[in-house]
Amino acid sequence: MSIAPDKLARIDLNLLVTLQVLLEERNVTRSAERLFITQPAMSRTLSRLRDLFDDPLFTRAARGLIPTPRAEELEQLLPDLLNAVSNLVTRHEFDPATFSYTFRIAVVEQFGQSLFGPLLAQLQKEAPHIVIQAVDYTEGSEELLARGNIDFAIAPENPEEVDIDFLPLLSSEPIIIARNKHPLAGKKKLKLKEVLAYPYVSCFPVDAIKSIPVFDSMLSELDQQRECFFHTSNLLTALQVIQSSDGLLAGPAFILNSDLLAKKFVQLELPKELRGMKKIIGLAQHRRTLTSPAHQWLTEKIASITAEYWQVNTRKK
């Protein structure tokens, strides 16, 4: 049953609170004292209540007020109604242990493979009812954030949308990865011509058209380019190719955060000409979720995990 907006607009919530007190006290004087108003003011409010409900609501007796059948009906409804209104305007304390929600996060696979393992391990202990749904990061992720289709995007660059908040997580220069028995493995002071003498696997997110890999940007500034013999958006496929060939893979350093990968692949020393150019990786979210305690909590978790694992990665170098 719907209620006309003009009828709702006539209802003063204070009147309902007053009616609840009158029903509890059955006395105008005691009700006025509880509400810290004068007895004449309480009498005027009772008159407004009678107009609102088109009913006397109470009749006077020697021992106080006697509710009418309409007032007795309202007495059954008011507690739940006022509690519901109270819950509506009260922000409840966020408790990760009981909170249930599915967060959708757009992320490039190279970063996701280092983040989600430790993140989910923490969530299982602290927030077992939170579900993470990872989707591929693409050019359209900013629009998905704006529409509310995803909660976060772990982006390789600061989004241009003004309503998107961007929290930098780490700054990374690219590394060159090879199988652990590659001819260049273990060699020191590699020259640029040595690392460009081998073919490369290009691993880059589908649809990330406007973004040029940092490695290629660096080579372009040196008037150089690499030869790519295989292109894929799938990191696992890229790693399988270089594991079975002398091909190389250029990418962010956090790829080797995994102990499993570190046993099979090595990080080649970056030629001095390629050092110093870094790429910012950050967490993007729409501003409408910035005040959400649940989103704030997950943001802190992602930031702390990134900082911890990036420090580990730095110490390994």
Image (cartoon, helix red, strand yellow):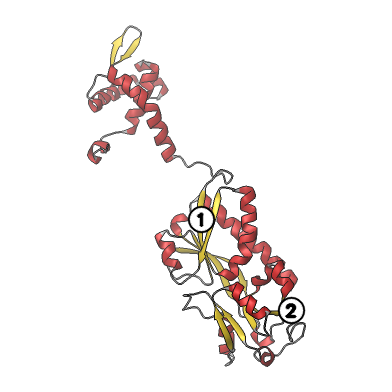
Tell me: residue 196, above or below residue 136.
below
Percent coordinates x, y for residue 249 in the rendering: 63, 80
Residue 280 vs residue 40, the one in the foreground? 280
Asked which quadrant contains residue 171, the reply is bottom right
Q: Residue at the location (67% across, 93% down)?
A: 193
Q: Residue 154, position in %: x, y?
A: 53, 66
> Mark 2: which secondary structure?
loop
Give above or below for 55 relative to 6: above
Q: Is residue 271 above or below residue 259?
A: below
Measured as percent of width and height from the top left, residue 125 is found at 64, 49
Res 239 quadrant in image: bottom right
Q: Amino acid at mark 2?
A: Asn
Q: Give the residue drawn at x 74%, y 78%.
A: 180
Residue 195's place in the image compared with 161, above or below, is below
Of residues 85 and 18, the one drawn nearer to the viewer in this rendering: 85
Residue under pointer 1: 103
The residue that label 2 is drawn on is 180
